[in-house]
Image (spheres, grey):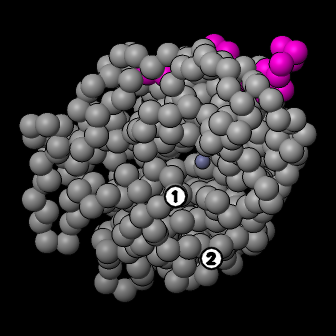
Amino acid sequence: MTGLGAQMHALVERLYPLCRSITGDGVRDTLDIVGEYVPLTVHEVPSGTQVLDWTVPQEWNIRDAYIADATGKRVVDFAASSLHVLGYSVPVSATMPLSELRGHLHTLPEHPSWVPYRTSYYTPDWGFCLAQETLDALPDGEYEVCIDSTLADGHLTYAEHVIHGQVPDEVIFSCHVCHPSLANDNLAGIAVATSLARALAEQKPYYTYRFIYAPGTIGAITWLARNAQRVNGASPAHGGRPARAKPSVGEGPRAGGKVKHGLVLACAGDPGRLTYKQSRRGDAEIDRVLRHVLAASERPHQVVEFTPYGYDERQYCSPGFDLGVGSLSRTPYAAYPEYHTSADNPDFVSPAAMADTLAVCREACAVLDRNRRYRNLSPYGEPQLGRRGLYDALGGRSDTKQAQLAMLWVLNLSDGEHDLLHVAERSGLPFDTVAAAAGALHGAGLIEA
Ligand code: ZN
């Protein structure tokens, strides 16, 4: 894992300088680099496209931006950090006194050496972000301001990577790719997702795994609008709004859809403990899996309730979709001082923390992939395990007693209602032991999936 942690950190450092936003070449350049690690299908959705209740905005691109003093010296320079310009700034080229310029300057007085991250996606505006101490050092006088940007009809860009499993039912992993030079808040999630995709590709997973790299909010909404049928099992109605499949008793609206489980990855590399935010449903299989994996691993962690805020879980868990999608992070959204500032830089995320987040994702996939409900085909009294060689098969194992007990638990709870995760929880046995017991019983023809 140490090597993987270093690889993920190297990817974060490589992506860090790029000026990403919800559209534009920064996203494309980011996806080009990620595409060197895993093959991506890149989608370009034209500006003006109706997506659910939203419209794909104009595409924003920026080449240069600066504030220069009377001598021509750049006192704030976009080339030094993509955070220096207000995201989606309209172009400007003017000279004005500092008193007038101040209305367009954003600082963080409580952290005078940090540069804040600010955007204005849906209200035309321009501005600069800078350290309070930089601003304090500027003498009054005339300043030249330049933002060489374009806002024009273009596209919104997102990408997918799919690992085909044994069944078409899908697990989605989603991360946002719309933040400029911010390491924990987007790049660590991208790096962990990419390493996870590479690891899963080396095995033949049970589920089909779909990785979604999309700009926050508008990107996830665009993905949902274009995938509503697969997600919900119902055709989208006019205007891109999916008709909600009529749920049958005991089934949510997503019962007919292909997307069965999912995780939003964000803030995946800071030094804090892990946080699992449950899906809106709270009792979805992904919620049970993450709660189990985190508790069993004895890692410091917290499990929190769903809130309709944070990252794109709020889209995947909107009531019309109500997917079993939770969110895995370390310190949550907005809960660390470095959040949305220049202090969220590659030094703030560590190879070890990203490797730890990745390990939890892999453990969760390993449980999810083997979690099934079985039916005991010999439910009247205990079947004779010895006669079927099932005791012999355990000989020499260091955990013989546990393995035997696991078989008895699986046989007892395989009534078609309880899955293996339930067996592990009720018996207190490790999921791996329970899954191995189910494998042996299945091999002996005593249970059926
Ligand atoms: Zn953010």
Viewer-side label of 1, 2: 1
Residue shown at the point (52%, 83%) measured from the top left: 426
Q: Please tell me in which quadrant of the rendered image residue 415 appears.
A: bottom left
Quarter containing the N terminus: top right
Return the disc, 1 or 2, that comes first in the chain's sequence. 1
Q: Position of residue 286 (x, y in %)?
A: 47, 61
Q: Which residue is mark 2?
A: 429
Measure how far apart labels 1 and 2 are at the Cα level: 34 Å
User: Which residue position is annotated with label 1?
Assistant: 310
Read off the magenta span: 59-78
Prevalent SS, magenta region:
strand
- Give the residue type that dot 1 points to: Gly
With respect to residue 390, does 208 lie above or below?
above
Quarter of the image that includes the C terminus? bottom left
Q: Under tag 2, what secondary structure? A: loop
Is 302 left, or right, of 435 in this rendering? right
**Quadrant in the picture for residue 322:** bottom left
Amino acid type for the residue under numbered disc 2: Leu
Q: Residues within 10 Å of mark 2 (few under 14, many from 20)?
A: some
Residue 397 locus on image (x, y percent): 74, 65
For label 1, the SS is loop
